[in-house]
Amino acid sequence: MKTNLKKFSTTTKIICSLLLFTIFISACKKDWNNDAVTVAGIGFVHASPGTGALDFIVDNQKANNKAFNYTNDLGYFGAYPGSRLFGITKKDSTKFISTANVNLQSGLFYSAFVIDVLPTPKILVVEDDLKAPETGKAKIRFINLSPDAAALDLAVVGKDAALVTAKAYKEASPFISIDPSASYTFQIKESNAVTATLPDTKIEAGKIYTLWAKGLKSKTDSTKFGLSILTNK
């Protein structure tokens, strides 16, 4: 497929017959080892503070059917494996403000984060481990997506040791096992000083989550530094 890196053609189709593949992936996610999986799963997350509403494009076709705003998580969609062109535009524009060539593998899941700030936001793609947690456990990971933050730790109130340590900007931890709880208070720490919290966070057995440092330490508005969570599965 010929792809124009400057512009894309707007269509009413969703990537890879989206409706069909979304249903197929939802079924396949229940059994990671199912050999029938023939597509890749892509999740889209807007983590670029101050960038405004976007459209996320895969191979010249729009992945979102509504505005894709800061901190939004679009969930997983299906895409053919192989080399895919990811791009972002301002909402309803036809001009890319960033692109990335991504090689997708059949049966694997990925998250594509829009990161950095205008005028040069970028696309960061990480692989997602959606294998089921141990019985009675959940899984979490931490990603530092705050452009002006130093290396960060992820901790939880009531535990002496940090869950994840020293993650630099754009760096993701592996998924780790954690006990479920009706009300965790997660903390971001920098040099042992708490810089952000996420209180009253429910973590359920059998589920998989990503916690991510967001925003800018230099801001006090809606783009200020903080901690968010999304459910991968």
Image (tube, rainbow, N blue to C red):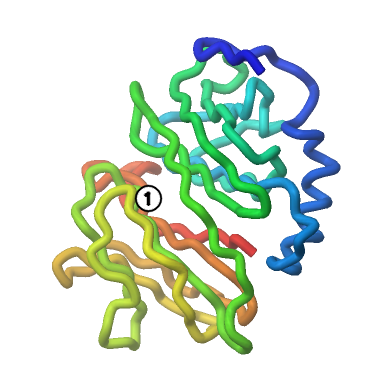
Which quadrant: the N terminus?
top right
> In screen coordinates, is 97 left or right of 206?
left
In percent of width and height, residue 66 lies at 68, 32
Residue where numbered disc 1 is placed: 214
Q: Is residue 52 above or below residue 206?
A: above
Residue 201 is situated, as x and y percent measured from the top left of the image, at 50, 73
Looking at the picture, does residue 154 appear above or below residue 181?
above
Residue 216 lies, in percent from the top left, at: 29, 44
Residue 109: tell me if it is visible. yes
- Residue located at (29% from left, 77% from top): 162
Q: Residue at x 36, y 78 (%)?
A: 156
Q: Position of residue 153 (x, y in %)?
A: 27, 67
Quarter of the picture holding the C terminus: bottom right
- State which quadrant residue 189 falls in: bottom left
Residue 54 shows up from this direction: no
Badge 1 local density, few (<14 within 10 Å), some, or many (20+)? many
- Residue 198 as seen in the image, left or right of residue 218: right
Nearer the observer, 101 or 152: 101
Is residue 175 rendered to the left or right of residue 23? Answer: left
Q: Residue furthest left?
A: 191
Q: Amino acid at mark 1?
A: Lys
| Residue found at x 51% / y 86% | 179
Which secondary structure lies at badge 1?
Answer: strand
**Quarter residue 138 falls in:** bottom right
Is 201 on the left-hand or right-hand side of 185? right
Of 212 and 104, which appears nearest the observer?
A: 104
Measuring 56% from the left and 11% from the top, which residue is drawn there? 4
